């Protein structure tokens, strides 16, 4: 029998994990330490995701991966022995604590110290994301168990010291803190320095945002739970999937409510008959570029000649920019549907010529004559992108007749992992290749490398749309990059957006002549050590690529034709 390559084994592992996740959702429950959970752990271990670093090394606990997971899971997840995934539940009138993770827009509720309920509103991608993180935490918990229990089932002194430290309410300092970190490093199999770095990272987030319980309590809690499971046969972690969750998957319930609210708002603002340009992006870059100069001028401050310096000036003045924008054609639509996707509606006819930054090439006469309206909505999550776009492109009823928005362009400004480059680079999609399926979508992209200023590396080629950020492997990515696919990056939403756009063109909901624009800025390079998402956020290096893409998209919309560059 022919031996599989590393990339083939990894792709098989991704497929196995997805099939297991789907089947367990239908089954209704599973135990991460049970047979099904072990199969998921085997698949994740075989895959060896880059973002989980040394997860496959049984001697050491993976700390950067732990930081990544804790930032994206609700506070207290480490203590839970019962986790429930459900569709929308009426928790508003209960005493249950609503908990939102630091770096993931998802809703969860603490039913008790040992029971957590996740309300799934974004579809299968969110389920895969949660199950991947739960599997990772269980793998690391088993490592801790093997470290702290000796052959006679007695607990090591370091564990007893951790139990004492975890019960202390006041922050440790000086020699006491050093000793506690040293003992913890022995349990984790890491150096003192590595353990200290993770302690300080989680401690900062714990103090600033109350998003986690700190490294000592996190390690003690997941260790205490697994000890109870292995030695005492009690409080075995169980994950449940409610019948309402099964009914919600693939029905686009939340996306339908989101789109209806947006379209009703357009009608209220009397903008439904105007040319519409849809943009998937963050909630700040388009707003700051269009209204930042006016907000600074109104406050009596000079507007910097450099566009990116102007952006830095207004980044911390969100309130002032919003106030100015609201009196110049800007409407903020907060999501009430549960989709977790807010919207900015911008009437470009309200942009004054004196408020346009000199570096922005916008034709005021064109905007006054053509009256374009921007619908800028926040990032979707994985498969949710199809639901959102599909419902937005669906006609709605007006006076008993189907009414189609006049959609002139759709732009997707995404955050993605780059394969040939580095953080801060720009990628332009020519196609989207769907991981784990035979689906591929050609993109007739209205953006090209010459649209962008010198100073940043710009790559053009196919993008890989992946199942999740935590389900990636170096060998698979290298294969997609170096093979005839020649993929330049990976992301989670582009293929799903394009599937909805292609379907809408086939159904006659939008014109095939409509402009499509896809551009991504590189948040990481999963092929380079130290540049994965687990290495931390972009910070200042993300300003130029984010705002450069936003600038080009706005210039494409606000002109008869883009003037040639000098």
Image: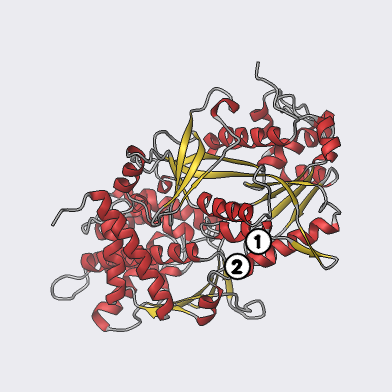
Q: Quadrant of the C terminus?
A: top right
| Left or right, residue 344 beside residue 212 | right
Task: Please tell me which residue lies in front, 194 or 553.
Answer: 553
- SS assignment at label 1: helix
Q: Which residue is mark 1?
A: 391
- Which residue ends up furthest to the top in the rendered image? 566
Residue located at (40% from left, 57% from top): 437
Residue located at (57% from left, 38% from top): 445
Category of crowding for the residue at label 2, using alpha-carbon neighbours closer than 10 angstroms: few (below 14), some (14–19), many (at least 20)? many
Q: On the image, which quarter does residue 255 sit in?
A: bottom right
Q: Is residue 495 above or below residue 231?
A: above
Q: What whole-number distance in Å separates the C-alpha atoms at marks 2 and 1?
A: 8 Å
Q: On the image, which quarter does residue 186 sit in?
A: bottom left
Task: Please tell me which residue lies in front, 464 or 115.
Answer: 464
Q: Position of residue 10 (x, y in %)?
A: 28, 54
Residue located at (31% from left, 43% from top): 479
**Res 194 seen here:** yes
Tell me, yes or no, whether the two marked residues, 2 and 1, touch with CB atoms within 8 Å: yes
Q: Which residue is mark 2?
A: 252
**Res 174 seen here:** no
Total number of numbered discs in the rendering: 2
| Left or right, residue 308 beside residue 530 | right
Q: Is residue 193 above or below residue 70?
A: above
Task: Please tell me which residue lies in front, 184 or 423.
Answer: 423
The disc, 2 or 1, on the residue closer to the chain's N-terminal end is 2
């Amino acid at each position: 029998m022919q031996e599989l390559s590393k990339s083939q084994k990894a792709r098989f592992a991704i497929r196995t994990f997805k099939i297991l996740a789907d089947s367990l959702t239908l089954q209704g429950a599973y135990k991460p330490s049970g047979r099904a959970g072990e199969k998921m752990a085997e698949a994740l271990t075989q895959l060896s995701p880059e973002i989980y670093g040394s997860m496959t090394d049984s001697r050491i606990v993976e700390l950067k991966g732990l930081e990544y997971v804790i930032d994206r899971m609700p506070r207290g997840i480490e203590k839970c022995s019962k986790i429930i995934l459900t569709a929308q539940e009426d928790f508003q009138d209960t005493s249950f604590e609503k908990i939102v993770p630091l770096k993931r827009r998802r809703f969860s509720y603490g039913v008790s110290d040992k029971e957590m309920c996740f309300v799934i509103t974004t579809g299968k991608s969110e389920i895969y994301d949660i199950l991947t993180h739960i599997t990772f935490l269980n793998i690391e918990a088993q490592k801790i168990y093997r470290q702290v229990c000796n052959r006679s089932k007695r607990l090591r002194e370091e564990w007893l010291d951790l139990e004492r430290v975890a019960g202390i309410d006041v922050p440790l300092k000086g020699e006491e803190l050093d000793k506690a970190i040293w003992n913890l490093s022995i349990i984790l199999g890491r150096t003192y320095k590595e353990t200290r770095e993770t302690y300080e990272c989680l401690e900062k987030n714990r103090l600033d945002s109350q998003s986690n319980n700190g490294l000592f309590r996190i390690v003690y809690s997941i260790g205490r739970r697994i000890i109870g499971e292995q030695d005492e046969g009690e409080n075995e972690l169980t994950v449940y999937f409610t019948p309402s969750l099964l009914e919600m998957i693939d029905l686009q319930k939340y996306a339908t409510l989101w789109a209806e609210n947006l379209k009703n708002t357009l009608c209220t603002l009397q903008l439904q008959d105007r040319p519409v340009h849809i943009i998937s992006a963050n909630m700040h870059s388009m707003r700051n570029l269009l209204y930042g100069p006016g907000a600074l001028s109104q406050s009596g401050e000079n507007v910097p000649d450099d566009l990116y310096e102007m952006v830095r000036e207004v980044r911390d003045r969100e309130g002032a920019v919003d106030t100015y924008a609201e009196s110049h054609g800007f409407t903020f639509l907060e999501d009430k549907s549960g989709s977790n996707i807010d919207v900015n509606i911008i009437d470009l006819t309200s942009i004054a010529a004196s408020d346009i930054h000199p570096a922005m090439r916008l034709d005021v006469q064109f905007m006054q004559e053509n009256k374009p309206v921007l619908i800028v909505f926040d990032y979707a999550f994985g498969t949710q992108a199809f639901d959102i776009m599909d419902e937005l492109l669906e006609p709605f009823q007006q006076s008993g007749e189907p009414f189609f928005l006049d959609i002139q362009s759709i732009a997707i400004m995404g955050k993605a992992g780059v394969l040939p480059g580095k953080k801060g680079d720009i990628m332009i999609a020519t196609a989207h290749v769907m991981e784990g399926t035979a689906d591929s979508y050609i993109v007739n992209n209205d953006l090209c490398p010459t649209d962008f200023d010198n100073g940043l590396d710009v790559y053009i080629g196919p993008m890989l749309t992946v199942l999740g950020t935590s389900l990636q492997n170096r060998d698979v990515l290298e294969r997609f990059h170096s093979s005839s696919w020649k993929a330049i990056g990976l992301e989670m939403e582009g293929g799903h957006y394009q599937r909805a756009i292609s379907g809408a063109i086939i159904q006659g909901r939008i014109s095939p002549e409509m402009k499509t624009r896809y551009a991504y800025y590189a948040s990481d390079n999963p092929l380079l050590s130290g540049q994965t998402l687990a290495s931390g956020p972009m910070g200042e290096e993300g300003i130029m690529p984010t705002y450069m893409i936003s600038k080009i998209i706005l210039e494409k919309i606000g002109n008869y034709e883009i003037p040639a560059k000098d």
